[in-house]
Amino acid sequence: MKRLLLLCVAFVFIFTPTLKAAEPENPYRLLERIAERVLERIGNERSKIEAEPNYLRTIMADELLPHSDYEFAARMVMGRNWQRLSEAQQNAFVEAFRDYLVTTYARVFTQYDETKHKLEFGREEDYANERRVVVRGQLIEEGGRPPVRLDFHLQRRTPTSPWLAFDLVAEGVSLLNAQQSEMQASLRQRGIDGTIELLRERASVEINLNEDIDLDNFQD
């Protein structure tokens, strides 16, 4: 179960079109399109990934970062501390957080096996007059294991704004809240400069396809 939950992390941070459209994309189809593209590319480029595991970083940067409001995510995990940072510290934190996310996504997808795993989305509901929606899904693995329940939370600022995913609740656990708790603890222990350096260190780790990731110690 813990290993499957890690696959959810890659969807926790804000998928958003880079250009504003007059008619925002259906939020349910938006998530399906992004997920299908990432998983399809991993399957199609499996041999390249096995030859050079760090290539997973390239896939994550190509497919997720263009649809990720990592600056918004960085501000959220910093909470009230964000206003206490200088502009230079804010920029450095956002850059380190962005690179950390790319590596996090890459490590998570070392656990993905296109021959065993499948992501399914629930029934589409009316969203025309809503500012926030929850796109429900489940991660299924062969072998009779119980599916992992996923709730993708999306919002739009105006009726014509694009839908933005701002959190994922996996089996009742908000992953954005978990990231925020970790950053707050790091700030107390290391301060902002130490926290930025911690993110940089984590962003620079080598991708290991044989890594046995456990959700309880994934922050290491």
Image: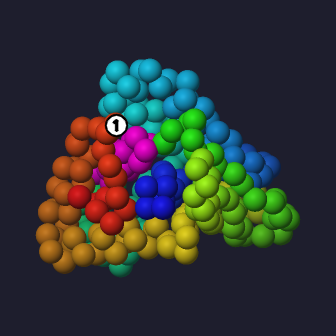
Amino acid tagged 1: Leu
Rendered residue at 40%/34% (across/down): 56
Describe residue 172's horizontal placement relative to residue 73 as left or right: right
Q: Is residue 115 above or below residue 143?
A: above
Q: Position of residue 61 (x, y in %)?
A: 44, 37
Q: Which residues are magenta?
A: 96-111
Of the pair 154 and 12, the residue shown nearer to us: 12
Q: Position of residue 42 (x, y in %)?
A: 51, 31
Q: Position of residue 155 (x, y in %)?
A: 65, 65
Q: Position of residue 72 (x, y in %)?
A: 46, 61
Of the pair 168 and 7, the residue shown nearer to us: 7
For residue 208, which quarter of the picture?
top left
Element assignment for label 1: loop
So how many labels did they put on this image? 1
Describe residue 103's horizontal placement relative to residue 171 as left or right: left
**Visible in this render: residue 17?**
no
Rendered residue at 55%/75% (across/down): 172
Which residue corresponds to mark 1?
Answer: 209
Describe residue 41's horizontal placement relative to residue 179 as left or right: right
Would you say residue 97 sits in the magenta stretch? Answer: yes
